Image: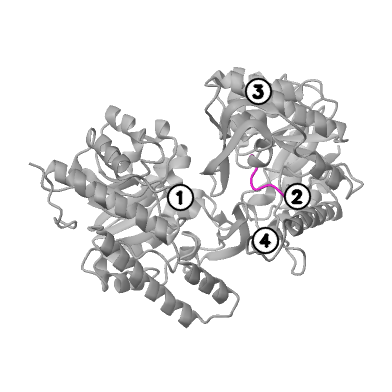
Amino acid sequence: MRFGTTLAGSYPKLPSRAGDVNLRVVKNRRDQGKASDQDVTDAVRETTRRVLALEERAGLDVLMDGCAAWDDAQTYVARGLEGIRIAGLIRYLDTNTYYRQPEIAGPVSWKSPITVEDFRAAKGMTSRPVKAFLPGPYSLYRFSKDLHYADPVRACSALGEALAKEAAALEAAGASWIHLEEPWLGRARAEDAAAVRAALTPVLAGRTLRTVLHVPFRAPSAIFASIRDLPWNTLGLDLVEAPAGWELIPMLPEGRGVALGLIDARNTKLEDSAEVARQAARAAGLRPDLHYQITPTASLEYLPADRAEAKVARLVDSARLAGKGDA
Amino acid sequence: MITRGLWTTTVGSFPKPPHLEKARQAHARGELTAERLFAMEREETVKVIRQQEEVGLDILVDGELYRGDMTTYFAERMPGFAISNPVRSYGNRYYRKPIAVGPIRRDKEQTVSWWQFAQAQTSKPIKGMLTGPYTMMDWSFNEHYPTREAMAMDLAAAVNEEALALQEAGAKFIQIDEPAVSVRPEELPLAVKALGRAVRGLTAKTITHICYGDFDVIYPALLDLPVDMIDLEMANSRYDLLEHFRAQPFTKEIGYGVLDVHSHRIESKEEVKEGIRRGLLVLRPEQMYVDPDCGLKTRTVEEAFAKLRIMVDAVREVRAELGIAVEQGATA
């Protein structure tokens, strides 16, 4: 069996080697009036180029651009939508990282492409497939403060419709994969089913590109019955932080894909490739009919750049061992 | 007749003045000696103590102007920890995160000499300020320990040694911050166990600061934290925690946050007074220590002290309304 390889979100912006463009330094220089906005844009592009080259060198099958221009996983897209304004810093789930909280202040709608230019730029930098990245609509709702709808289903539906238009724009720009980051599906309860489906259905329905519903940190066990039959292609599971995800694999619909989050994106400790390969083979043994990828559990951005790079190498090595049946 | 209560304090950190920030950066680049930076940090610590006295706070802090990140500062001073390359916290802000690479222990003092220096500057009490074992564990990478509990308990023993050393030096208030406690309700029992180990043998008043979390889940279990006082963000949550206290009385002393530290806006005296009055509907004044929601280090120096002036004025007026004497010995 072949195990595909890809990332699961954003990637550290800082270079791990001296001499490479350092986006942090360029931004600081811009803030001190010593560099221009164009310099920052150039540094973002150079960072994207470096991240894609690193992924390509490591041997990943499907690349991600690393979200070099994003301040966090929500606001880059949220600020491009009508009806949303961006408020103060707030803790991101149970981590020691932060995001600016979107506030839904009016009817939400999509005005124009938000991420398409970045996607095109990344696509032009590599011959490998590039997976586009969007915040999942349900999680975007849960990360936001709703000051307008006062009804989770209506708010989720509006966010889903808006992000569906962005997904369609990415599709039109040539994206063949899209990664929807949905950490809140792991925290949703059965009674949230209507809101979850209202959020996800517009984004997933009728897509020709392959959709990844990625649930980092916790398993979507409580909501699984409500998302099982939605038209996603691949379900991304965090099997390190949330071993309960193993129980979902036997229940996945026939012919779908599963992204096995086996490389811990929240700890610097390097995995043993052979052990990861054994875990991947175990999953494949449970359901030989599924398509498998090995991925980090979440965005590698939680790690310092040197460890992230080492983890990407382990990921590829694990997939090679698992594919050879050496596990 | 109420004679005590509504003391004023702060949560710990104060903003570093721009020239000190620059000096820290210059030191990191090797352009400023450790001795020169240390001298500047002491100079600024004296200033921040004077400013707290001028504002009229009852219980002071050293301001933590010599610290960077609240976990990394301690990790840099303990065997068993390495420090990572920079990790992003938000946007263009990065910090170096601790990595547990071996057994963690305390082999030297971490804050005691700073506490002694600060206390020597004032007759008012200075709080000893530590980061709690659960937060140190949760906000570090772990390449050594088999379980989160094993790491937290080693850290708890180390924190306990430092806390006992602060007490031995004369600290009457010891605050052990646990901002990570509120975000993983399922691990509250571990946090309680670790904090219990960290405060073992302390007779000083013990305090923990935790940040806003899912109070529907963690309250009233939060009251199991084995300290005398729990310091909470009240203003940031628009005082909605009071509803929980109405349903289940808050049985400990409370650090009652009335200033939003995430906002540049200076609160009005009336809104702070109103926040305190709302608290007094479900809390006793002798339970309440009024303070900002969190550390003030993210504000400018001017904003921080403008907010504190408003807070102290508001408390004085509410004290007067209640007939509480202004000078009353906060350590009593």
In the rendered structure, does residue A70 fall within the stretch colored magenta?
Answer: yes
Vertical placement of residue B33 versus A82, above or below? below
Picture quarter containing residue A246? top right
Magenta-colored span = A69-74
Nearer to us in this view, B43 or A256:
B43
Tag count: 4
Question: Where does label 1 land, which residue?
Answer: B264
| Marks 1 and 4 close (CB-CB < 8 Å) | no
How far apart, in angstroms, are the residues tagged by discs 2 and 3? 45 Å
Instruction: Locate residue B17, reporting x and y percent.
Output: 45, 67
Q: Which residue is mark 3?
A: A158
**Marked residue chain, label 1:** B
> What percent of the width, then of the height, locates residue A322?
81, 44
* Residue type beneath disc 3: Ala
Q: Quadrant of the C terminus of chain A?
A: top right
Horizontal arrangement in the rendering, residue A24 relative to residue B218 (left or right): right
| Dot 4 amino acid type | Arg
Find numbered disc 2 in the image and state the secondary structure of the residue it sits on. Answer: helix
**SS for dot 3:** helix
State the separation of the CA atoms marked 2 and 1: 52 Å
Front in this rendered view, residue A68 or B110: A68
- Location of residue B129 by image quarter: bottom left
Label 3 marks a residue whose chain is A
- Which amino acid type corresponds to the residue marked 1 in the rendered image? His
Marks 2 & 3, CB-CB < 8 Å contact: no
Q: Nearer the viewer, mark 3 or mark 4?
A: 4
Disc on res. A274: 2
Give the mark nearest the N terminus, 4 or 2: 4
